[in-house]
Every structure is written in structure tokens, then in C-alpha cells.
Image (cartoon, rainbow, N blue to C red):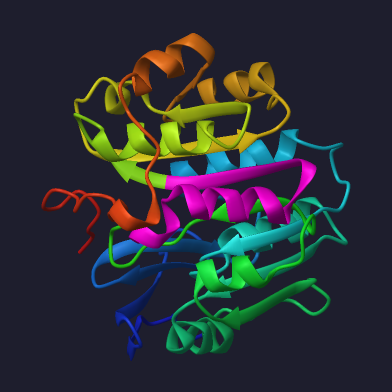
Amino acid sequence: MDEPIPVTREVDHGTAKLMPDVDRARAWLLTMDGAPQSYVDLDDPTHLEFEYARRIAHVLDTVAEPGSPLTLLHLGGGALTLPRYAAATRPGSRQRVVEADRGLIELVSEHLPLPDGSGIEVFAGDARAVLEEAPAGSADMIIGDVFGGSRVPAHLTSLEYARSVERVLRPDGHYVANLADGAPFGFLRAQVATFAAVFEHLCLIAEAPMLRGRRFGNAVLVAAHREPPLADLARRTASDVFPARVEHGAALERFARGAVPVRDADAVASPEPPGGAFTVG
């Protein structure tokens, strides 16, 4: 059998590259302009290489009865790592994936095709526009994983955006977002304040060194009208290869103290990562 070879292609928003994993037969890393974006194992969609993806998966695993199907809206697609995971762990789920880069959709469809009957629908569009057009109360979970380059776009960070998320979620639904920041956490603190203005319950999942300001990194924000399964999330994240903490309640309030909700008029993208923070090769 021929060895898989890297694939490089200019897509709508940059240079995409698919690189095979030498340790796993049908696993691939997708990068955009050198920044890792997705990792997919076609033989084992439950294998999640990136820590932030595992943390989102922990939420997905614990918010409903194991194996029961959910209706999911993914804002940001990449190589469809989390939709594949949900299809494998919650068969029968209905999933819509919005990806702004049409060329990237075509690349992934060509080289990393979805299995038949996956229940995953992928289409090109702007995440905010699609969210605002979605029917009210139509999703059990909305997963926000949109990066323009290495930054979360400003129009997906505002109070108006958070209210659109709330409108589309079912009353017991959850919003889960992959965010990135570093000390002094102006962006992340503002995101906590923004979603706390709309949802009663929030938690933040991240590694302790990142939260102590020692490095730039990813944090997963969870927002809902009912309390997330905090104890279960804490156990699962603490047992990861790179353990994380689940900040909530008074600790999260202290973290965000002084921050105010961000409106469309003054929203900004997440900060540019320091050189080398999210690059490979």
C-alpha cells in the first residue's frame, strides 16, 4: 500500500495542509497557514488529539444520557473532528456544520470523506448569519469553534451574538466555545461577563498554568440555563493527559471581576497568539 502523502492547497482563507500521522494509519492533521486546526482519525473518530477537543467532548458526553441522539449546530467545521465524534458516540444525532471556507469544505470532503449515514450536513456560510436564521429552540448544543487565522472573529463575541445563541438553544441546551487568550485575559474575562449576562450558569475549562497567566492557550467556555454536570466534568478533565480545571461559581466570578459585557459596536477579535504558540512545522 502506498504511503499517504501531505496535501497542500490554497483555499478561500489561506493555505490548508493535510499531513498524515506516521503513528496512526488513517489519521491526518489539518493546518491553516501553519496553525493546527483539526486532527482526524478516519478509523477511530473517538480519538481526539487536541486537548480543547477532548474538553468539548467531555461536555458532549455528560450533558445527556450516554448514547442518546442530540441536535447539534457546529459553528466552524475544519476537518469535522467533533461532528465525527458525536456521530460515533451519539448515533442518530442530527448535525449541521457551518464553515466559512468553501475551498476547505471541498478539500475535506475529497480527502477525509464522511461515512454514509453520518447525519452530518456541512455547508458554507458565515456562522453569525446562519445562527440568526436558525429556528428558535432548534438545538440541544451549539459548539463555537470559529477562528479567522488564529483569532476568534469579533462578531462571534458580543452580547447580541450570545442572545442569538440563547434563542436557538432549547431551554436545557448548552453553548460550548473554544476560546484563546493569555494574561491579563481581557478577552476571556469579557467573554465570561458577556455570556453571564444571558445565561445563569457558566463554567470555564482550562489548564491551571494557563489560568495562572503562565502561557497563552485555549479555554472552553460552557454556558447554559441549567447547571452543567460540574462534578463529572471536573473528574474527566482532571484525568486527561494534560489535566484541566473547571472554574465556576465564585471562582469564575473572581476571574471575571470588573469585566463588562461586550456589544457589537465595541467587540474585538481574540488576541493574536504570541509567535510560535499555535504553529507546527
Residue found at x 52% / y 89%? 106
Percent x, y of residue 273: 19, 50
Front residue of 235/75: it is: 75
Residue found at x 59% / y 36%? 223
Asked whether residue 77 appears in the rendered view, the answer is no
Number of marks in the rendered image = 0
Vertical relation: 136 (above or below) 3: above
Which image quarter: residue 91? bottom right
Question: Residue 276 vs residue 152: left or right?
Answer: left
Which residues, given as a range, are shown in magenta? 152-178
Percent x, y of residue 25: 53, 67
Q: Residue furthest top?
A: 250
Question: Residue 135 vs residue 52: left or right?
Answer: right
Which image quarter: residue 173? top right
Question: Residue 173 vs residue 220: left or right?
Answer: right
Percent x, y of residue 72: 72, 58
Residue found at x 47% / y 61%? 39
- Is residue 162 one of those drawn in magenta? yes
Residue found at x 66% / y 16%? 231
